[in-house]
Amino acid sequence: MLEQILHLDTELFIYLNNLGTKSWDAFWMFYTTKFYWIPLYAILLFFIFKEENHKMFLLTLVLIVAMVTFTDQITNVFKHGLMRPRPCHEEALQSLMRLVKPYCGGKYGYFSGHASNSMAVAVFSSLLLRRRFKNLIWIMVIWSIAMGYSRIYIGVHYPLDVLSGLTFGALSGVMFYRLNEYFKRRYNLV
């Protein structure tokens, strides 16, 4: 059963990865680079700052750092625990796929850190700002899914890596949001 799922995952990867064209490569390389999203993170932090009092904002900032660290480190535990090679490290796939990046990245890819981190940020920030921006959740989830797709497009993750990362990120975002709300109530930081 697992072997069949992994085979289907590989087939889906080859299909989605080969949808790419040279004319879109630069866009997806830009999209997948975390550095370019700093302005978005700054805007989200600005609105979170406007929502919270100063003490709560500092605590929320600490929780955001903890959340990103948590998702990142758990991703690494899975990568090194399960040791599923990235598709770009699979010799059998080299002639069937497009590697857009000049380098493949680490040896293992299950599950995607980009997908888990972006979805955690998407869910956490959307829940914090939902009173002010009702539809932000949809924008942020689409942004995060596109981040996950960018990893398939450039050739460094299978779809299952991305789906697992998105799921784990969503759960982490909810968990840290609830932790944030707990601290807000516990220490009366409303």
Image (spheres, grey):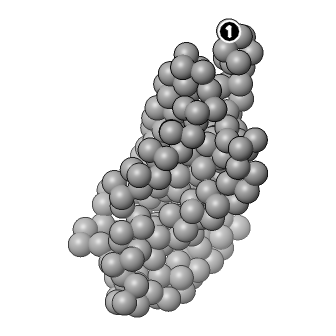
- Amino acid at the residue labelled 1: Tyr
Q: Residue at image x 67%, y 41%?
A: 129
Query: Image height check: is 46 above or below 21?
Result: above
Could you tell me if residue 78 is visible in this image? no
Q: Which residue is under mark 1?
A: 187
Eyeballing the image, is 36 above or below 55?
A: below
Horizontal and vertical percent for residue 44? 53, 44
Q: Nearer the viewer, residue 156 or 127?
A: 127
| Count of number-bearing discs | 1
Of residues 4 and 150, which is closer to you in this image?
150
Say whether residue 154 is left or right of residue 185. left
Residue 167, can we see it?
A: yes
Task: State the residue lying farthest toward the top.
Answer: 187
Say which quadrant the N terminus sits in. Answer: bottom right
| Residue 22, picture quadrant | bottom left
Callout 1 environment at 10 Å: few (<14), some (14 to 19), or many (20+)? few
Residue, x 41% and y 64% (percent of image)?
A: 32
Vertical relation: 119 (above or below) 179: below
Q: Pinpoint residue 174: horizontal percent, then vertical percent.
A: 69, 38
Residue 114, x across and y down, in percent: 47, 55
For this view, does 176 lie left or right of residue 36? Answer: right
Give how far across and how far down residue 160 sits, in percent.
Answer: 59, 65
Q: Residue at x 31, y 60 (%)?
A: 105
Residue 180, by quadrant, is top right
**Mark 1, secondary structure of its residue:** loop
Q: List the single residue furthest toward the left.
A: 102
In the depicted structure, whether residue 64 falls above or below residue 183: below
Q: Nearer the viewer, residue 101 or 62?
A: 62
